[in-house]
Image (tube, rainbow, N blue to C red):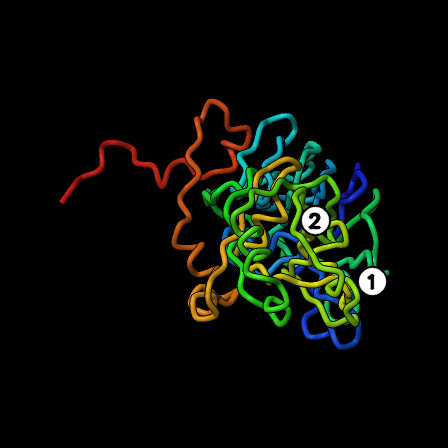
Amino acid sequence: MIVEVLKAGPGVTIQDQGRAGLIAQGLSRGGAVDRLALLVAEALLKRRVSVIELAGAGASFRVGQACRIALTGAHRKANADGNPLRWNASHNLTAGTVLTITAGQGYAYVAFDAALDRPEVIGSQSAHLKGGIGGHLEPCELHFTDARIGTSDLLDVADRTDGGTVRFMAGPQTDAFSEEALAAFTNQTFTKSARSNRQGAGLDGTVALDAGQLSRISDFITEGDIQITGNGAPFVLLAECQTIGGYPRIGTVLPCDIPIVAQAKPGAALRFELVSTDEAEALWQSDVQQVAALRSKISPLLRDPATMHDLLSYQLVSGFIRGDEEWF
């Protein structure tokens, strides 16, 4: 199957699970910034997929044959040949359909129920912009194999663009902060800054630092770490973070709550709650466990037949009778 990329604004990239286990070589995991959105797509389509990530940008595509898609992540307006499509849902598209997704805040994802025929680089198809691997998607043809159609389903997940409470656990440098500084951090409401990208999310707010904390030797850092920068403003590291840093880290956001930080829109309120290591371990789930839990929440996508542009692609009756058959 060929999917023609008709338009793609800045920030549109191909992503998957990323490249784990390469921090020692100086390469962060990368992959989809909102991993929950990636898992929602996999739950809806019942397969591992590479997705197209739209970081604030819009895009349009023409599909070469009948296929199914999933739309996940930050809500956007999407339509198939002008007919509106629900978000966090799977949809069947007929051959030649033009799929259009508008620009908007946050990270939106479109996944095709097919296998992207694209070579892997260091074990992944993901673009890693900071690492110089791949780049922004431009008008081109994407080739897929094993394209499928299937059911149209809905998977309601909590909206993450309005911020909320983010749980974090202590890290190797948490003890370097005074009790007063830690209390100031957990009692404060921060707001998401516009200074955010795939590398990290800046927050507006201040945590007091003493002079000694700004002369630390650079140390390893990873996704979820909360750095307190020189002006006292926190910065939460995301998928494409650097792997070495010198700013002190007050703790690490739990993986399950990183999507809240990543998808919060500028100005959204974020508060931080410190949890114990035992609590963090109890909350951790593998991707397999998360997908299984998400699948249990899937429901059929109910639509008004009058608004279904693809109504004739469904089997509407299971059989015919003449009406004069003998029953026994």
Q: Earlier in the sequence, mark 2 or mark 1?
A: 1
Residue lying at 75% horizontally and 65% vertically, measured from the top left: 212
Identify residue for label 1: 131
Identify residue for label 2: 233
Amino acid residing under circle 2: Ala
Res 174 → quadrant:
bottom right
Residue lying at 68% horizontally and 33% vertically, measured from the top left: 104
Note whether residue 96 is visible: yes
Q: Foreground: 321 or 40?
A: 40
Q: Foreground: 141 or 78?
A: 78
x, y percent for residue 98: 69, 34
Q: Which quadrant does the C terminus fall into?
A: top left
Say which of marks 2 and 1 sits in front.
2
Q: Determine the secondary structure under disc 2.
A: loop
Res 8 → quadrant:
top right
x, y percent for residue 295: 43, 55
Which disc, if any, is residue 276? none
User: Looking at the image, how many numbered discs can be counted on the residues?
Assistant: 2
Residue lying at 57% horizontally and 39% vertically, measured from the top left: 269
